[in-house]
Amino acid sequence: MQQPMDPDDRLLQYAFTLYDSDDDQPYYDDVFDPDVDDGTDDYNVLVNRVNSTSDKSYVILKEDDLLLRQEKDITMVSTVLSIPQDSASMLLVRYNWDVTSLHEAWFQDEAKVRGSIGLLDVDPAVKFPQTDDKTVDCGICFDSVTSRETATCGCDHSFCKTCWSSYVCTSVNDGPGCLTLRCPDPDCDAAVGPDMISKLSSPNERKRYDLFSLRTYVESNKKIKWCPGPGCEYAVEFDDDFETGSYDVSCFCKYGFCWKCMEDAHRPLDCETVAKWVLKNSAEAENTNWILAYTKPCPKCKRSIEKNHGCMHMTCRQPCGYEFCWLCLGPYRGHDVRACNGYTQVGGQVPESERQRELAKKAIERYTHYYERWAANEKSRKQAISDLHKIETADLKTLSVNYCQPETQLQFIIDAWLQIVECRRVLKWTYAYGYYIPKKEEAKRMFFEYVQGEAESGLERLHLCAEKELQTYIINEDEDATEEKFNCFRVKLSDLTSVTRSYFENLVRALENGLSDVEAQTKAGTGSGSDQGDSSKGRKRKRSDQAGESSGLGTDGSRRLRVVTTRRPMDDTQRHAAWVAGESSSNDQG
């Protein structure tokens, strides 16, 4: 009869699955031959794998793409309703660019729709008289001008073009409200359309007006949002049901964000958890906790006091001025002839104020632990982006000259840095994930910290190789840095990139599932010993069979095993499990 599996055995066994995925990463041969072309673009595939942070479909739209879509809707409405395109544009703004709703409302009550935006049914030529030379008085400046020098919205209110230009330009500079501009006469609701804006404003203001119109088109569309990246002018169309799944997207500007909540890309966390974390990072509650943990109330006036000098003699600020001991909160007068080092328990219980202070201090220490690591990985990610830009713009050319290789064959370096950037982002959010693991789920927390630590160790190895070792070949001061050694470095960096990517992809999937497999493994431990033994043997045989498929894959499997068990002290149970898996791999290779 088999003995029940130890919980640590089950956790280690599950850890292997983070590397053993159905879609194993390609293994790079130890010998690189740049002249061999297998007909595939492995570099592009790798880059696509790195950037594919979402299983959903989305499209990055440039300004020209948006203008074409906007023009298409305007043309459709203009054709169907038999109205000028300027009028169609004003109607679409009013109906939030919903063509269907506009058509339904128009055919139900055209007069009501026209009245809602002040769209008059007049000939456009009426707005700018060309043949009438009679003199009229401007309704704003009261100057006498000819009719040719005036303009009107189609109503009976004529104003000189100088006043019109000032009115239009001021409205455009004031913001998007110019899209619903009305006649200057306070009692008139006639609309000022794009045709008048075009003729009465400067080129810069016309461009600004068109930009406002384009923004309303994007912001009214439920499936399109602007990229929040600094200075980015792209928009993202997300084609999904907006109910489940990941919404992380990567824009052409290389800025990653969540399409749903518009925060930074945050897989494997859900938007609700991210919102709580972001709020916590900026909430006043943390300030309150800090005050509670690191200050004490004055015994007399009860104001909070922070100790900012070395001695224990505290003096409250005026007008209180009370002097007391920081340790015992007793009056300081006479304190020099008595000590307060003795422990006295009042009533057999710790005072409530002290208990609250200790709880607040522990809460702050726990939060600080996770926040510091969250912030450190974000800082490292930003530095990696900066390093990547430098490599793309300068270092690749240097390496190409030093080792006589085209830049296209140095893409593996870019792939590694893209992977580093992505993994830093994932690792950053795992700390927020760990912060919100419930205290009662101790087994899940312990296992999470284990796999998180392995992810961090693997990423550090990749980052160190891409950052430090690469510099020796860029600077080229070492005479031993030959082309042959550079090709060995290529294999090493490519392998580290592949293994790290595989681990993080499986880690993200596991965390998105709430580490449900860990719970299943733990529950399975309460079953019969024979069932667990058979299951364990089956998993070992499966790993052994997978390891024996080819010598190359066997080597890759051994490498993955080493990554899982590196830099973590193992007890006898874990060491035995690692030895069994290693022996299976070695025997199959033999």
Image (tube, helix red, strand yellow):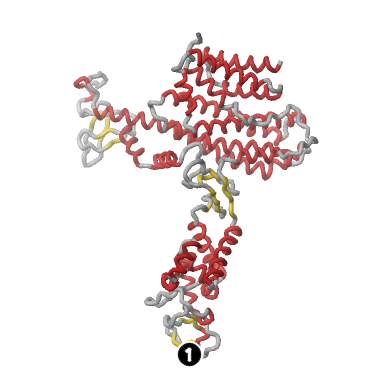
Q: Quadrant of the C terminus?
A: top right
Q: Position of residue 479 (x, y in %)?
A: 76, 29
| Image position, residue 100 (x, y; %) | 49, 62
**In the picture provided, is 289 more to the left or to the right than 200?**
left
Nearer-the-camera pick, 321 or 176: 176
The answer to whether any part of residue 447 appears in the image is yes
Tag 1 secondary structure: strand
Camera-side residue of 297 and 362:
362
> Could you tell me residue 217's position as x and y percent?
51, 60
User: In the image, residue 586 lies at what x, y percent?
Assistant: 67, 16
270 relative position to 482: left or right: left
Q: 395 and 227: which one is in front?
A: 227
- In the image, what residue occupies the spot 70% across and 18% down? 589
Residue position marked by numbered label 1 in the rendering? 135
| Local crowd size for mark 1, using a 10 Å CA cut-off: few (<14), some (14–19), many (≥20) | some
In the rendered view, tell whether residue 512 sits above or below residue 99. above
Residue 134 versus residue 500 in the image, above or below = below
- Amino acid type of disc 1? Thr
Residue 443, by quadrant, is: top left
